[in-house]
Image (spheres, grey):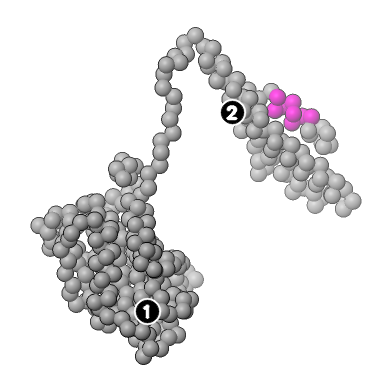
């Protein structure tokens, strides 16, 4: 069919459209994946070389004309439908219209934005690293070689290409050391994955924020100052905390910072496993082997790091008693925030 014939046919069909559904069908017939114009362009290779250029110009010109004409016809169809509805003797003009419901930010998003804002105001970089990570950055560079028993602490989703879904945002530590010139301070918020069963306080997919600071002189007291600043800024209330020894291959010494459960007030509930305490922020001074993996000299540079479970922070902030509510997709839950 010649260009002029297609154009004449298309304009006649477009003028006959009376409903939005018919307009969508018209658009698919001419501009869809299997539409007349699309298939015509795909068939150019079958034409003799001396005809291809002219045919392509004609078809592309027709496509532009239809792309311009369709929105105009849509506006006209909507106007005619509204006018017909208004002229209906049974139409009640006092009835309220259909309102578009506003979206709601997820509580994880709200808390992550607050955490990022707190650290940015303290001079930290906010870095973003891949969720599909290499074994080197997720384990070996963090002082966890292949035969290290600490690998049993984190059940991992391995990928067919030999990589894995990161089990912690700590995987960004050595990446940051290679990318940023020390001294520096940075956080790495993001989603992590663990192959484990879910319960009121655990999930296979959750969010973390890793914090890292490197300088010539770093101490545990320095680390605690930043952690306390973060907790007070995000939780917006006074809380009882405790610091106890903890083992993590990439820090030495290592600690667990726990806060008194804000869901039950320390009395005991499924969230805190009836202990009254919630493990919130594993932390410690960066192990010299990790600094070496980042191509830096541990005799010159020291650092501290922490890993914050963002889901648990959200649960404490809003007193949510089940982590599965955060990823359940129930809009009634999300709308509360």
Residue, far right = 50
- The residue beneath circle 2 is 20
Q: Position of residue 173 (x, y in %)?
A: 39, 75
- The residue beneath circle 1 is 214
Q: Position of residue 288 (x, y in %)?
A: 34, 86
Q: Taking the image as drawn, is residue 315 in sight? A: no
Mark 1: few/some/many CA within 10 Å (<14, 14-19, 20+): many
Which span is picked out in magenta? Answer: 8-15
Secondary structure that dominates the magenta span: helix
Element type at marker 1? strand
**Residue 291 sits in which quadrant?**
bottom left
Element type at marker 2? helix
**Taking 215 as reference, is 89 left or right?**
right
- At a point 18% along the width and 64% down the height, the residue shown is 259
Quadrant of the drawing holding the C terminus: top left
Q: Tell me whether the residue at label 2 lies in contact with that at label 1, contact meaning CB atoms closer than 8 angstroms.
A: no
Q: Is residue 229 a member of the stretch shown in magenta? A: no
- At a point 52% along the width and 11% down the height, the residue shown is 88
């Amino acid at each position: 069919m010649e260009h002029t014939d297609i154009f004449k046919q298309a304009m006649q069909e477009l003028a006959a459209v009376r409903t939005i559904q018919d307009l969508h069908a018209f658009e698919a017939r001419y501009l869809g994946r299997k539409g007349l114009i699309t298939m015509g362009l795909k068939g150019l290779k079958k034409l003799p070389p001396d005809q291809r250029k002219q045919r392509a110009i004609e078809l592309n010109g027709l496509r532009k004309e239809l792309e311009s004409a369709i929105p105009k016809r849509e506006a006209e169809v909507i106007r005619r439908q509204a006018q017909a509805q208004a002229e209906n003797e049974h139409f009640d003009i006092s009835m309220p219209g259909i309102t578009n419901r506003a979206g709601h930010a997820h509580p994880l998003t709200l808390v992550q934005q607050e955490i990022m804002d707190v650290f940015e105001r303290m001079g930290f970089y906010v870095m973003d690293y891949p969720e599909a990570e290499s074994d080197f950055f997720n384990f070996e560079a963090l002082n966890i070689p292949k035969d290290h028993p600490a690998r049993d602490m984190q059940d991992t989703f391995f990928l067919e290409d030999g990589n894995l879904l990161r089990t912690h945002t700590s995987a960004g530590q050595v990446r940051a050391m290679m990318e940023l010139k020390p001294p520096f301070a940075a956080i790495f918020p993001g989603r992590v994955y663990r192959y484990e069963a879910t319960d009121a306080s655990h999930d296979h997919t959750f969010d973390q924020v890793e914090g890292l600071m490197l300088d010539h002189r770093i101490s545990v007291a320095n680390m605690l100052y930043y952690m306390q600043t973060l907790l007070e800024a995000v939780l917006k209330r006074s809380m009882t905390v405790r610091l106890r020894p903890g083992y993590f291959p990439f820090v030495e010494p290592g600690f667990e910072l726990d806060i008194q459960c804000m869901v039950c007030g320390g009395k005991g509930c499924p969230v805190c496993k009836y202990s009254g305490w919630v493990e919130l922020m594993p932390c410690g001074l960066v192990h010299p082997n990790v600094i070496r993996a980042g191509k830096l000299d541990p005799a010159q540079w020291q650092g501290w790091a922490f890993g914050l479970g963002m889901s648990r922070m959200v649960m404490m902030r809003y007193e949510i008693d089940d982590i599965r509510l955060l990823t359940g997709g129930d809009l009634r839950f999300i709308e509360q925030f």
